Amino acid sequence: MHQGIIPGAIGVTELNLQESVAFTGRHGFDNVMINIEEAHAVAQEHGTDYVVELFGEYGVKPGGWNLPVRWSDDQMRGERLADLPALMETANAIGCTAATSGISPGFDDGEHAAHFERAVEQLREVAAVLESGGCRVGLEFIGTPSYRKERWSHEFIADLDGAMKLIQAVDSPALGTLFDVWHHWVSGGTVEQVAALSAADVVLVHVNDAPAGLTIEEQIDTQRTLPMETGIIPAAEMLQALQRIGFDGPVMPEPFSAPLNELAATDPDAAGARTKESMDQLWTAAGFAV
């Protein structure tokens, strides 16, 4: 496994590609989440070798990119998918074939079975394009109870088992899960469930911790902490289980921490250093070499 960073997730915003790569290298992370459309634009202007050399200059690799296709949007999906092959050419050229997207945990109208089948059809369309371009997408389920209960009439997919049933129904090697320890924990997930996955099931991993003094029902999706800050989420044990199944991809903190964001607003490098320290603590707790 390799420590990565999403600068925006720790409050370090408005960085361009070069600034993100430099920030990542400066703080000792292995890889960074990128904007594939920005990387493609830079490659179009300067060539893909320029982008590859940019990462190499700082000893960093691109870790993944957000899929620029809202797969559940029937009106826009086709148009956005038409743009994807060119972006995937750049992704392959720079060695970054992992994309990420999400699964809505609820819906308002209709029956669960029909909503599930529609999601399978939509994802098959996206997966076919990804397969043709040699890329994969990790789908993230949203497990936070307060988040889904406040927004939708019916629950859809809000745990690992549900996400894997959807992925298996689509039946494409282009699909896996973006495994977030927060969402697994708040959904009542166990380390044993992680151990039952295969390496091919997992595309990318998010790590974090939970504020103390709250029940799972009281936890707020956008109010988390850095890994190991409270020790409430057994993130180290989950990473150990991922290692045992052979996962060897990016692991990125997504703390959504107000104090960290405040620090980043005045001293981005201090926020980067604090984040790296927390990741090293997590690595040590899991028994990994730092």
Image: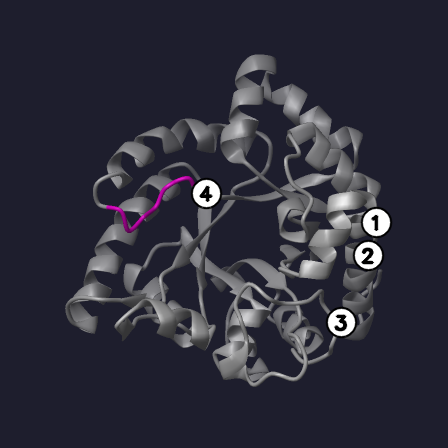
Mark 3–mark 1 Cα distance, whole angstroms, equals: 16 Å
Expressed as whole percent of the image width and height from the top left, the position of residue 74 reads 22, 45
Of callouts 2 and 4, the N-terminal one: 4
Decide: few, some or many residues near mark 1? Use Cα within 10 Å; few <14, some 14-19, many ≥20.
some
Decide: few, some or many residues near mark 4? Use Cα within 10 Å; few <14, some 14-19, many ≥20.
many
Q: Is residue 199 above or below residue 79?
A: below
Mark 1–mark 2 Cα distance, whole angstroms, equals: 6 Å
Tell me the residue that label 1 is attached to. 270
What residue is shown at x 42% (from left), y 39% (from top)? Answer: 68
What residue is shown at x 66% (from left), y 84% (from top)? Answer: 213
Tell me the residue that label 3 is attached to. 229
Do the residues under discs 1 and 2 have CB atoms within 8 angstroms?
Answer: yes
Of callouts 1 and 4, the N-terminal one: 4
**Quarter of the image where one finds residue 152:** bottom left
> Which segment is the magenta one?
68-73
Expressed as whole percent of the image width and height from the top left, the position of residue 36 reads 52, 34
What residue is shown at x 45% (from left), y 30% (from top)? Answer: 87
Q: Is residue 209 above or below residue 94?
A: below
Tell me the residue that label 2 is attached to. 274
Is 218 in front, or is 17? 218
Dot 1 lies on which element?
Answer: helix
